[in-house]
Amino acid sequence: MARIRKLEIAELSEHQLRLANEIGGTRGGGPAVNGPWGLLLRNPQLCERGAALGTMLRDATSVPKRLSEIAIAMVARYWTAQFEWYAHAPQALRAGVAKEVIEAIRDRRRPVFEKKDEEAVYDYFTELLETRKVSAPTYKALIAQVSQEAAIEITAIAGFYAMVAMLIVAFEADLPEGAKPQLPE
């Protein structure tokens, strides 16, 4: 059960309602009052700036969508952020990430990769999340597969989604009605 109750549309200020509609619209739904956006709406300036950064990281980087979704899946799994996993695991599949890769990440197993860039991203974030640093060989392998610019961008993407995951976990954000948790504890 969520620690903070869901905002109701009727109680939103004009600014909050505009933000909820904009955020929901760019993410394929109605007003965003659930999950992390419902939490951030309590501070409209933070919400607006967070949404702008999230949109930029989604739409205006050199990182292929399938690689960013692997990074997001790894962060969601690291934090066991159910809402984030619920929202992004299907996006990873639509972006071309193999179902077996997503299932392995969900189950905390090392996936078998067909694509070297996906393996480099996985190794990079595994090391970064588990040890809080990145070895020279892991860094070089990532740069060889993506680019320095993409490495910076994908790290920013993961950092943004770590913030989202922390909000979800700390405030026990509920899944949308009818949705079941997909990550084992």
Image (spheres, helix red, strand yellow):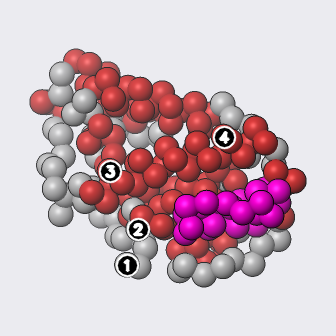
N-term-proximal mark, 3 vs 4 = 4
Report how many numbered discs are placed on residues in the image.
4
Residue 59: quarter of image: top right
In this rendered view, identify the residue nearer to me: 113 or 122: 122
Disc 1 target residue: 185
In this rendered view, identify the residue nearer to me: 105 or 175: 105
Three-letter amino acid code at disc 1?
Answer: Glu
Q: CA distance from mark 4 to mark 1?
A: 29 Å
N-term-proximal mark, 3 vs 1 = 3
Give coordinates of residue 72: x percent, y percent. 55, 55
Using the image, determine if residue 103 lies above or below residue 165: below
Q: Are marks 3 and 2 in contact (CB under 8 Å)?
A: no
- Residue 102 colored magenta? no
Q: Secondary structure at mark 1?
A: loop
Q: CA distance from mark 3 to mark 4?
A: 21 Å
Q: Secondary structure at mark 3?
A: helix
Give coordinates of residue 165: x percent, y percent. 40, 54
Three-letter amino acid code at disc 3?
Answer: Leu
Q: Are marks 2 and 1 in contact (CB under 8 Å)?
A: yes
